[in-house]
Image (tube, rainbow, N blue to C red):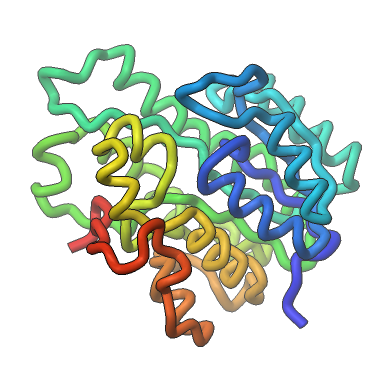
């Protein structure tokens, strides 16, 4: 049987949204989850902390290690990786989920925001992969999964938010490069992206409020698709840009209605998909 039982997942941005959903799905198998995120105090705009997520993970059947980590900083990532290895004995899976977003054009993107997106999305995912690699290559079925889109160089995706697109596409470039670089180590490096918008705080606060939430799917679709990818044989499944709905269709799912926030309403296709 395919399972993540006993596996250790290092998940960035796991205090809420897609990261937490992936954590909870793995926890139901009995996995160990490193909750690597910044939030330790509740914010009404961004519900969830590393501690509340850890409690939910343990309630779901997993083991949790909450680590306050800002992935922009090498010392914090290294400390969290070391703590994870000390606590659970290794790392089997890295989920690069943490991300910064600003859907602004060139003239409206401050350099502070530009740097934040590059530091979190591009540099942070690179850093986490670099730090986790020595432990991943010791695993029986190691995976890196970036929550990033398929590469599409159409001007449409650069015209209105070039800085964000560049930062997000960097995570996808790592998939191309690292899947080849780490192939000899048996480490799968893949990307996963949703076909529709997902009901997260970012969608609510930045992309359209409650109307957009109603046109979205629940984070659980990404969690189920992620589980399907992460339980595949790493040496046979690497360098792929997966779409959640397509993954689950391959797994035999025919009815996607339960994933909809408001079944029956039209769904909003996500960015970067034609």
Q: Quadrant of residue 70?
A: top right
Please give left or right for residue 205 compared with residue 274 in the image: right
In depth, the one of 77 and 214 nearer the eye is 214
Q: Position of residue 84 (x, y in %)?
A: 81, 38
Tally the marks: 0
In depth, the one of 232 and 173 nearer the eye is 232
In depth, the one of 63 and 120 nearer the eye is 63
Residue at (90%, 39%) from the top-left corner?
A: 87
* Quarter in which the N terminus is drawn: bottom right
Q: Quadrant of residue 229?
A: bottom right
Examine the rendering and report whether any part of residue 180 can be seen.
Answer: no
Residue at (33%, 52%) from the top-left corner?
A: 197
Q: Is residue 213 above or below residue 114?
A: below
Q: Position of residue 11 (x, y in %)?
A: 64, 43
Please give left or right for residue 27 compared with residue 94 in the image: right
In depth, the one of 17 and 132 nearer the eye is 17
Q: Position of residue 43 (x, y in %)?
A: 54, 19
Please give left or right for residue 208 compared with residue 256 in the image: left
């Amino acid at each position: 049987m395919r399972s993540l039982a006993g596996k250790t997942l290092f998940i960035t941005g796991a205090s809420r949204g897609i990261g937490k959903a992936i954590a909870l799905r793995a926890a139901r198998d009995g996995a160990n989850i490193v909750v690597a995120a910044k939030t330790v105090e509740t914010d009404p705009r961004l519900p969830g902390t590393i501690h509340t997520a850890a409690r939910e993970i343990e309630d779901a059947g997993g083991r949790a290690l909450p680590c306050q980590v800002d992935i922009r900083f090498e010392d914090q990532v290294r400390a969290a990786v070391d703590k994870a290895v000390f606590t659970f004995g290794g790392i089997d899976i890295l989920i690069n989920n943490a991300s910064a977003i600003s859907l602004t054009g060139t003239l409206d993107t401050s350099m502070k925001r530009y740097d934040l997106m590059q530091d979190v999305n591009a540099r942070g995912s690179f850093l986490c992969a670099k730090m986790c690699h020595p432990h991943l290559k010791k695993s029986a079925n190691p995976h890196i999964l970036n929550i990033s889109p398929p590469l599409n160089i159409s001007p449409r995706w650069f015209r209105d938010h070039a800085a964000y697109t560049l930062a997000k596409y960097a995570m996808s470039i790592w998939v191309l490069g690292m899947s080849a670089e780490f192939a000899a180590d048996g480490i799968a490096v893949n990307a996963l992206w949703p076909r529709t918008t997902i009901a997260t705080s970012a969608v609510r606060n930045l992309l359209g409020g409650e109307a957009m939430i109603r046109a979205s799917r629940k984070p659980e679709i990404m969690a189920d698709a992620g589980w399907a990818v992460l339980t595949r044989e790493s040496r046979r499944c690497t360098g792929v840009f997966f779409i959640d709905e397509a993954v689950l269709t391959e797994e035999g799912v025919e009815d996607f209605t339960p994933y909809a926030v408001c079944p029956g309403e039209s769904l909003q296709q996500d960015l970067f998909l034609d």
